[in-house]
Amino acid sequence: MNTSYVNESIRCTVENCKYHSDGKDYCSLGSICVGAHKNNPTDCKCVDCKSFESAE
Ligand code: SF4
């Protein structure tokens, strides 16, 4: 995984994701999948990055 890549179209602050860019608040993937964990999302707390994988 090349986490030195900075996808400037995907800002992200989740530093414990294995796809987080090294030292910058961006994602290193070319694209991500965003989804909801509630049937009728009403604000941003209801949605998640489904491409997340733990860095640990
Ligand atoms: S995969 Fe999702 S959570 Fe992980 S760095 Fe990229 S945008 Fe952030």
Image (spheres, rainbow, N blue to C red):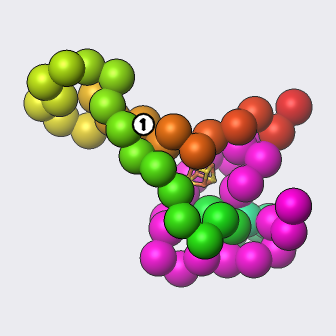
Q: Position of residue 28 (x, y in %)?
A: 69, 67
Q: Residue furthest top?
A: 38
For residue 43, side relative to residue 33 (left or right): left
For residue 8, side relative to residue 52 (left or right): left
Judging depth in this view, the residue of 33 and 6 nearest the camera is: 33
Q: Quadrant of the C terminus?
A: top right
Q: Position of residue 33 (x, y in %)?
A: 47, 50
For residue 24, side relative to residue 48 (left or right): right
* Total marks placed: 1
Q: Quadrant of the N terminus?
A: bottom right
Query: Residue, x 13% and y 24% (percent of image)?
Result: 40
The answer to whether residue 26 shows anywhere in this view is no
Query: Residue, x 73% and y 54% (percent of image)?
Result: 19
The residue under label 1 is which amino acid type?
Asp
The answer to whether residue 23 shows anywhere in this view is yes
- Prevalent SS, magenta region: loop
Query: Residue, x 19% and y 20% (percent of image)?
Result: 39
Q: Position of residue 21 (x, y in %)?
A: 73, 65
Label 1, secondary structure: give it: strand
User: Which residue is denoted by mark 1 in the rendering?
Assistant: 48
Residue labelled 1 has its Cβ within 8 Å of some atom of ligand 1: no
Snapshot quadrant of residue 44: top left
* Other-residue count near label 1 (Cα within 10 Å), few / some / many at <14 / 14–19 / ≥20: few
Vertical arrangement, residue 23 with respect to residue 5, above or below: above
Magenta range: 1-20
Query: Residue, x 12% and y 30% (percent of image)?
Result: 42
For residue 54, side relative to residue 8 (left or right): right
Snapshot quadrant of residue 45: top left
As for residue 37 lying within the magenta part, the answer is no
As for residue 3 lying within the magenta part, the answer is yes
Q: Position of residue 47 (x, y in %)?
A: 33, 35
